[in-house]
Amino acid sequence: MSTVLVLNGPNLGRLGSREPEVYGDGSLADLEVLLRASAPEGVEIDLRQTDDEAELVHWLHEAVDTGRPVILNPAAFTHYSYALRDAAALVTKAGLLLIEVHISNPHSREEFRHTSVISGVATGVVAGFGFDSYGLALDYVTRAD
Ligand code: DQA
């Protein structure tokens, strides 16, 4: 593995100013810097964000076609996007790692956030540790892949 895709769903482009009491005050650019600094030598971080469900689905298809592991924060799509679930299943059924991550702990929040339609097809889930959720997922991916 030389590149890890770090894919982020809707509204995560607003990190830094979006509900800092929930998501902290770091931006997505800050997250990218942190992950690049913690990635082992030779491992590239390809971090992307979109508000568009179709684009996220296409990026998961790309992961399958290029054989890349995925760290995915599906954001609100977590809770209802069967299209994203089916695309995530393509990744793990191809034998690739797909780690679902959340900055907050959705289980300690509103009831609609307690359901993830993604978790059932993910390799694993890390939630509730702020940006460290991504770092923990990256650590696993780089050791296991
Ligand atoms: C989130 C949790 C989701 O419920 C929410 O819709 C998000 C962010 C998180 O990282 O904590 O946008 O995925």
Image (cartoon, rainbow, N blue to C red):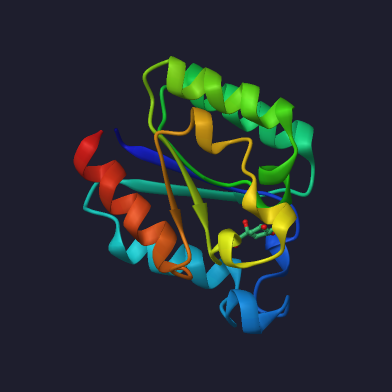
Asked if residue 72 is positioned above or below residue 33 in the image, the reply reads: above
Question: Is 19 situated above or below 14?
Answer: below
Residue at point 59% right, 82% down? 25
Residue shown at 56% from the left, 68% from the top: 29
Image quadrant assignment for residue 16: bottom right
Instruction: Give the side of residue 105 with respect to residue 123, left or right.
Output: right
Instruction: Depth check: give the residue in front, 54 or 84.
Output: 84
Which quadrant of the figure shows ligand 1?
A: bottom right
6 up-or-down from 94: above or below = below
In the visual, does 28 lie left or right of 93?
right
Residue at x-position 25% and y-position 33%: 145
Image spot of residue 53 (x, y percent)? 77, 37
In this rendered view, identify the residue nearer to me: 17 or 75. Answer: 75
Quarter of the figure that contains the N terminus: top left
Total numbered labels placed on residues in the image: 0
Residue 119 placed where, x, y %?
52, 38
- In depth, the one of 125 and 4 nearer the eye is 125
Question: Residue 42: horizontal and vertical position, in percent?
Answer: 25, 46
Q: Is residue 46 left or right of residue 110?
A: left
Q: Identify the residue at horizontal 65%, vertical 67% (top origin).
A: 109
132 or 32: nearer the viewer: 132
Q: Position of residue 143 (x, y in %)?
A: 20, 43
Residue 55's image quarter?
A: top right
Looking at this view, name the residue that lies furthest to the front: 111
Left or right relative to 130: residue 17: right
